[in-house]
Image (spheres, helix red, strand yellow):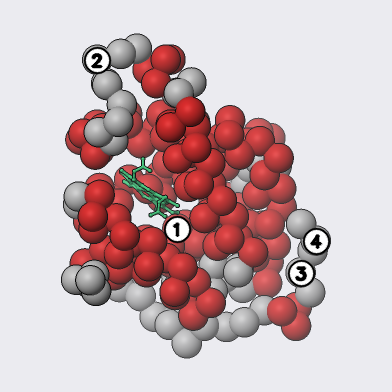
Amino acid sequence: MTKIDSENHVKSKNVVTGNDIKSYLNYQERQAIIDSWNAISTEKQKYGTILFLKLFELEPRVKSLFTIFDFNEPLEDIIQSPHFRSHAMRFMQSLETGVLMGFDKESCDFLFKSLGSRHHFYDLKSEFLDVIPECILHTIKKGCGNNWSNETADAWKIATKVLCELFREGLETKPKK
Ligand code: HEM
């Protein structure tokens, strides 16, 4: 992924937020997202697995949504299954699309709202999304190793806030038949 130039910095109109994390990335933050994503992007399968293991640890109730897995089986076997691997990959590809769009709220609107809306049919509860930022930060931090910094963490907090807000909105909007 190439570097961005400052002209590509699109400032979203959705600037003010309720919980001290803003809803747009500035130039440096977008660059931090790109650099840190580059550390894991060639190994999406591996890092997607790390992310879902964290999700199952922090929010074990989501296991029941994956009806195709038998969680009585050892986790080592589940994470080797083609279904788990393909789902982890699709999750990471969606995240990568967010990276490419600089997690700009307007650009990401359709993608994350429609994804959230589809999760309505997977019985996802809105509260399960609360742990998603931590799972994503945990994963990127692992990939970055010593290059992880407070600035990178802050950039991902903004990015995951944008993702989760749009996704949650999609999830909570009654899907059209
Ligand atoms: C707690 C959070 C989440 C849970 C428990 C969850 C669970 C699921 C389940 C059960 C499915 C359908 C069955 C399957 O293919 O195995 C699914 C599909 C999918 N999920 Fe998630 N999901 C979550 C959040 C997300 C997020 C935040 C993203 C995007 C960044 C995402 C991306 C996808 C994609 C791309 C699919 C493929 C099917 C489709 O596009 O509808 N998921 N997810």
From where the camera sits, is residue 151 visible? no
The quadrant of the image that shows the C terminus is bottom left
Residue 12 coordinates in the image, percent (x, y): 52, 83
Q: Is there a contact, CB below 8 Å, between mark 3 and mark 2?
A: no
Q: Gap in Å between the C-alphas at discs 4 and 1?
A: 21 Å
| Mark with earlier residue (1, 2) | 2
- Is the C-beta of the residue carrying label 2 under 8 Å from the nearest atom of ligand 1? no
The quarter of the picture where residue 173 lies is bottom left
Element under disc 3: loop
The residue under label 2 is 72
The residue under label 3 is 4
Element under disc 4: loop
Comparing labels 3 and 2, the label whose residue is closer to the camera: 2
Up-down relation of residue 126 to residue 134 (above or below): below
The residue under label 4 is 2
Three-letter amino acid code at the position of disc 1: Thr
Three-letter amino acid code at the position of disc 3: Ile
| Mark with earlier residue (3, 2) | 3
Q: Gap in Å between the C-alphas at discs 3 and 2?
A: 46 Å
Up-down relation of residue 176 to residue 63 (above or below): below
Residue drawn at point x = 43 percent, y = 31 percent: 84
Q: Gap in Å between the C-alphas at discs 1 and 2?
A: 31 Å
Q: How many marks?
A: 4
In this rendering, position of residue 131 left or right of residue 146: left
Nearest to the observer: residue 96 or residue 12: 96
